[in-house]
Image (cartoon, rainbow, N blue to C red):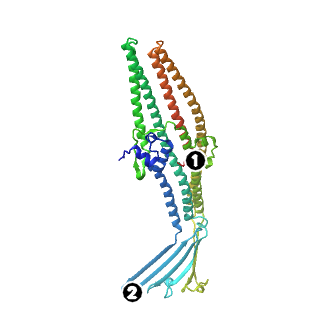
Amino acid sequence: MKYVLTLFFVSYTCFGFTQSNAVSKVLRFDEYLGYVKKFHPIVKQAELIIDESQAKLMKSRGAFDPKIEVDYSQKKFKNTDYYDKLNGTFKIPTWFGVEVKAAFDDNSGYYLNPESNVPDNGLYSAGVSVPLGQGLWINSRMAALKQAKLYRKQAELDRDVYVNTILYDAALVYFKWLQAYNELKLFENILINAELRYTGIEKGVEVGENAEIEATEARIAVNNRKLSLEQSKVKLMKTALELSNFLWLENNVPVELQPDMVPDVHTESIVDAAFNINKLRTQDVILDEHPKMLSLNYKLEGLDVERRLKANKLLPKINADYNFLTEAPEVTQTFNTADYKGGLTVSFPLFLRKERGDLKLAKLKQQDTQFEIDATRVNLQNKISALKQELESYSIQNEITNEMVFDYERMLQAEERKFQLGESSLFLVNSRESKLIDGQLKAIAIQNKFFNTKAKLFNSLSVNPNL
């Protein structure tokens, strides 16, 4: 359910407008974007990417947590204690695959395996387990932690790209709303002129200065302007509702714009400041610092960790264990090399087909990502260059259309004076006015494209502004 809030409430609680009614009706572009960035649910959702990366990092670090293991088993049958075995172990995994262990064994029983016999007070051991082949320089724990750290950095960049995209979409809707509002004001002014012209001609018909057919033609022009005005009202209403999709309050409460809320018609300088367009247009882009490129580079680093892990799987598994044994661990001198328990485990597949296949797949993933990086770099470079040139073109087009509109206004004024003097016809006046309307609509459309191109440049550079 949407809560339709009053304009004053929206302005006071969210945008910090002044309390004057005239100012409170204007929704500035930078304030609108700041509001979207702060409260929009999708932006908040983007923050979950960071939380997810932190959770994955914590999970990977958990592989290095110390562990306590207790193994107890007992067998009793026909009043005979076959065995009663207790083994408690404390393990500390380390970075390079070495595992530090301390254990306690307390075994007894009539049918106990002789190798499990221990002193009456139990037997203590302390030692290490060392991988001498596979898992020494890199293992699954090390790889998971490295990849989690890289993923966290990548997530921060992806979050910025995600937020930038939301702000870009919100900006396009604001510009569409501004275009619809400008068209509405245009048709309101044009309708006023058409109605004044019709009223004057009607009076002229009454006194015999104008023909009845001229009044009919003037009335047709008025109705055409009314129709255009109604269509522009519908367009403005639809864009206002579309804009409302980006307006939220705290606690995920949606906001619907009131009909008297209007965009800032003098918004070009605000757009440039919000997007930092002047800097983006003049500054040379260092693509290697682009968030998308940095994110892909972190992805490539993560794949390199995976490749090194798969390459390490080609080595044989050689695990060496050595443990000191003692009955009295509290006495340091009781630990000596004469009492120990040790072993060596060796395992090595003959053909290594699985390991070689995994390594090949890891290398293919790296190549695929490298191709993606190369393609993304070229695409970004060309896109940014094209948008900068497009902005220059729209700057020129704006000047041309403004000059055309000025000339159309002069032509209409001249034609209206000639009509008042009886040297022109209403048809020519309406024709001049239609040309003026077309020129003004074209100027509004070009302004909208100009703003959209600025937004595209902002989006292509994945800037995350401080609003």
Identify the residue under disc 1.
Answer: 372
Seen at 43% across and 49% down, the residue is 13
User: As drawn, is 222 to the left or to the right of 291?
Assistant: left
Residue type at mark 2?
Thr
Above or below, 163 against 281 in this view is below
Give the distance between the C-alpha atoms of the residues marked 2 and 1, in whole angstroms: 71 Å
Upstream in the sequence, badge 2 or badge 1?
2
Of the pair 101 and 318, the residue shown nearer to us: 101
Q: Position of residue 257 (x, y in %)?
A: 40, 42
Nearest to the eye among marks 2 and 1: give it: 1
Toward the front, the furthest residue is 20
Q: Which residue is mark 2?
A: 80
Front residue of 19/85: it is 19
* Residue 432 appears in view: yes
Percent position (x, y) of residue 242? 42, 40
Q: Position of residue 67 (x, y in %)?
A: 50, 72
- Farthest residue to the top: give it: 208
Q: Quadrant of residue 318?
A: bottom right
Mark 2 packing: few (<14 Cα in 10 Å), some, or many (20+)? Answer: few
Q: At 41% from the left edge and 51% from the top edge, which residue is drawn?
A: 252
Residue 243 lies, with reference to residue 64, above or below; the image says above
The secondary structure type at the circle numbered 2 is: strand
Mark number displayed over residue 447: none
At which x and y percent is residue 394? Answer: 57, 33
* Image quarter of residue 192: top left
The residue sitting at 55% across, 39% down in the picture is 269
Q: Visible in this render: residue 215?
A: no
Three-letter amino acid code at disc 1? Glu
Are there few (<14), some (14-19), or many (20+) residues within 10 Å of tag 1? few
Secondary element at image label 1: helix
